[in-house]
Image (cartoon, rainbow, N blue to C red):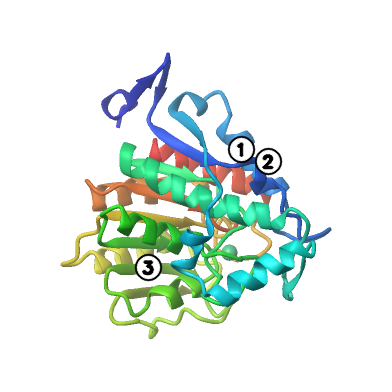
Amino acid sequence: MHPVLSGKYVGTALVTTTVVWHPACGLHNPGAGHPERPERITAVLGALRAPDLSPFIQWQEAAPAGRESLAVVHRAEYLDLLERMAGRGGGLLDEDTVMGPGSWDSVLASAGVALGAVERGLELGTAFGVTRPPGHHALAGRAMGFCFINNVVVAARHAQRLGRARVLILDWDVHHGNGTQDLVDSDDSIRYVSMHQYPWYPGTGAATECGIGNIFNVPQPPGLPRATYVRDLLAAVDLALDGWRADLLLVSAGFDSLAGDPLGGFTLEPEDMAQWTTALRERVAPAPVVGMLEGGYRVDRLAAGVSAHVRALA
Ligand SMILES: [Zn+2]
């Protein structure tokens, strides 16, 4: 689509999507050698500010999430634990999920970015939230897999409060979003489609895990031809949308499913994410499409993937 057909002018720039971000998302530092490092955000923001893409983007700094938004999804005791740990300057939540000084500010900023992205997406039709730390492994009462707060489910509940009753969550991160699945698998107002490497971390995501008929898992081996992953994810989306209309699509956009990522073995290229984004927009139209960042650990590939996804949102 030519941008003139879907965009609006803000000042002199042609703007067709909003990128929601917060500077505190760069503060969380889980330690030397950890793959979920602050450089990820730097690379993503740099790619989105590139001259060929920036004219299509309106930037919005989010407000950090308040506890009430998190409490819709997470247990009070768990939020208390996180706040106490943050007050002590940090601690270890699981073997690879570490809270350091600054991490709690990042966690609240990341959830706030997810909330802001939903609000802007509902206004403009698309948005992308630069969420870090990621969220899709976080459970109601437990951090895991680099994730503290389940940003995408927090966003889905916010959208429902704003009147979008049925939310489709699509997750193309190379890892199964066990937290997202666990938080929605008995709720017929949300459908969750995930394609992920299997068996692989975190061990969940078998095709037999269907929830109440609202969970659509596509477990895949590594090393398949790109086109197979592209086709199979869209087929699962078609299944999820068969007889069910989504009022909003949230994309848990993990870029560790790109070829070359150190934490996954999929073979996807940035243009595959762009193709998915365009195909998904067509499938759910006129419902808004809001992407938010999950994984992606080779920073040059991450930057290229986000750039392709946001370009297709614009
Ligand atoms: Zn991942």
Q: Say whether marks 2 and 1 touch (CB < 8 Å).
A: yes
Determine which quarter of the picture holds residue 265: bottom right
**Residue designated by label 2:** 42
How far, Cα to Cα, is label 2 from label 1? 5 Å
Residue 110 is at least partly visible in this image = yes
Frontmost residue, 132 versus 277: 132
Crowd rating for badge 1 (residues with CA inside 10 Å; few <14, some 14–19, many 20+) = some
Instruction: Please tell me whether mark 3 sits on a helix, a strand or a loop.
Output: strand
Q: State the CA–CA distance, disc 2 to disc 3.
A: 29 Å
Residue 248 in the image, given as x and y percentages of width and height: 30, 54
Residue at the farthest left position: 243
Name the residue carrying label 3: 193
Q: Nearer the viewer, residue 279 or 9?
A: 9
As displayed, is residue 19 above or below residue 112?
above
Name the residue beneath numbered marker 1. 45
Mark 3 or mark 1, which is nearer to you?
Answer: 1
The residue sitting at 65% across, 52% down in the picture is 106
Image quadrant occupied by the N terminus: top left
Q: Say whether residue 302 is left or right of residue 155.
A: right
Residue 73 vs residue 308, the one in the foreground: 73
| Vertical arrangement, residue 98 with respect to residue 201, above or below | above
CB at disc 1 and ligand 1 closer than 8 Å: no
Query: Compared with residue 232, is residue 306 higher up or lower down, i.e. above or below?
Result: above
Q: Earlier in the sequence, mark 2 or mark 3?
A: 2
Give the percent coordinates (x, y) of residue 140. 51, 75
Could you give the CA–CA distance between mark 3 and mark 1, rounded to whole angstroms?
A: 27 Å
Furthest residue to the top?
Answer: 12
